[in-house]
Amino acid sequence: MTAKDIQTDFIKTYLKPTLKEHGYKTSGQTWRKSMGDFFIVINLQNSRWNSKEELSFCLNIGVACGLKIN
């Protein structure tokens, strides 16, 4: 099993179900949860130097505003 296979299995088996259970919706490797006028956004960003043997990634977490300002 390669590092990418392990990551994919982790995302499918643990990360997606856990975030879904807590109200997050997903699009690819980005999850978002509406909190009224704001959204919590989590994005999994893979390193471009990943190989079959080694893999690194970042979880970017942010808050986005959905307000329209006139």
Image (cartoon, rainbow, N blue to C red):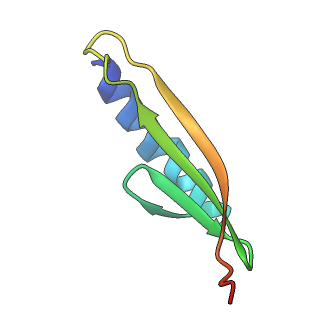
* Residue 70 location, quadrant: bottom right
- Please identify the residue farthest to the right as the structure is shown: 36
Q: Is residue 27 above or below residue 69?
A: above
Tag count: 0
In what quadrant of the picture does the N terminus appear? top left
Of 5 and 35, nearer the camera is 35
> Quick check: 15 above or below 6?
below
The image quadrant that residue 56 belongs to is: top left
Q: At 31% across and 16% down in the image, what residue appears?
A: 49
Q: Horizontal and vertical percent for residue 8?
A: 36, 36
Q: Residue 52: image x %, image y %?
A: 25, 15
Q: Is residue 50 left or right of residue 7?
A: left
Residue 39 at x, y percent in the picture: 66, 67
> In the image as oriented, which residue stretches furthest toward the top?
53
Lateral position of residue 46 relative to residue 41, left or right: left
Percent across and percent down for residue 10 are: 46, 35
**Residue in the foreground of this view, choosing between 49 and 70:** 70
**Above or below — where is 14 with respect to 65?**
above
Residue drawn where x is 61% and y is 52% of the image: 18
- Identify the residue at image location x=58%, y=40%: 60
Quarter of the view holding residue 4: top left
Furthest residue toward bottom: 70
For the point 66% across and 51% down, the residue is 62
Q: Would you say 33 lies left or right of 48 here?
A: right
